[in-house]
Image (cartoon, rainbow, N blue to C red):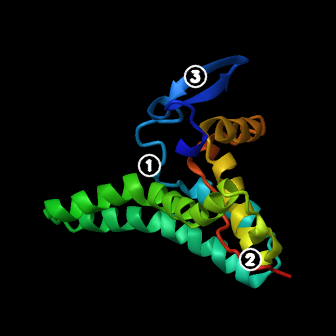
Amino acid sequence: MKSWTSNGSIWCNRKGKVFPSDLMNVGQERYFYKLKELTQKDIEFVRKIAIDPTKHELLRKLNEDWLNIFNFIFKLKSIVKENDTNKYELDELIDKAIHNLEEDYHQSIEGNAIKHIDLILAKDISFFQTEKERIEFAYFLCVQYMRTKKRQEAICNQFKNQNNSYLEDVNIVDPDFQTIN
């Protein structure tokens, strides 16, 4: 966001109040992306909305794989605990993954978008002429928009009205950049 600052500040609009802020004071929350272990009810919900109704087999497998990836670290932690393994270093690595896995994933998306942002700053939007580049940049924009706390809370609140209060632990992502017919 540094490219959009003026004298080291960026302008924010919060509840109709517009004010300048240092980049370090904008959108930061400690362990915002810390993984939460999904309950069986959470898993059934994800399957119900993102896996079972999907007709395209590749997308079904992709969504099932995402579910497995986000649950694997907790299965590993459980196995270590059940086997009474006193490996402090292993516990530390697992906790680090729980705290950083999703943030690292978002960093990779942002890293892929740097080329597009640099081109836009140079007033060159020629990458929009290539379908793959358009999709990749659109995916970046959508993820950036949907990963904000305000957006996540708004979505969760919509589902809470339907008695799905557990939704705040579920993040559904589709990182596939291929066109699916």
Residue extending farthest to the top is 17
Which residue is disc 1 drawn over?
34
Instruction: Please report whichever mark, 2 or 1, sits nearer to the chain's N-terminal start.
Output: 1
Q: Position of residue 166 (x, y in %)?
A: 61, 43
Residue 130 at x, y percent in the picture: 79, 77
Q: Amino acid at mark 1?
A: Lys
Quadrant occupied by the N terminus: top right
The residue that disc 3 covers is 20
List x then y, in percent, for residue 156.
68, 40
Q: Which mark is residue 151?
A: none
- The mark tally for this picture is 3
Q: Residue at label 2? A: 132
Q: Amino acid at mark 3?
A: Pro
Work out how far the residue at label 1 is from the one at label 3, CA to CA, in angstroms. Answer: 29 Å
Label 2 neighbourhood size at 10 Å, few (<14), some (14-19), many (20+)? some
Q: Earlier in the sequence, mark 1 or mark 3?
A: 3
Which one is in front, 28 or 151? Answer: 28
Residue occupying the point 74% across, 61% down: 138
Which mark is nearer the camera, 3 or 2? 3
Q: Would residue 1 appear left or right of 158 to someone viewing this image? A: left
Whether pointer 1 and pointer 3 mark residues with C-beta atoms closer than 8 Å, the reply is no
Q: Position of residue 81 (x, y in %)?
A: 25, 61
Q: Residue at x 64, y 69 (%)?
A: 175
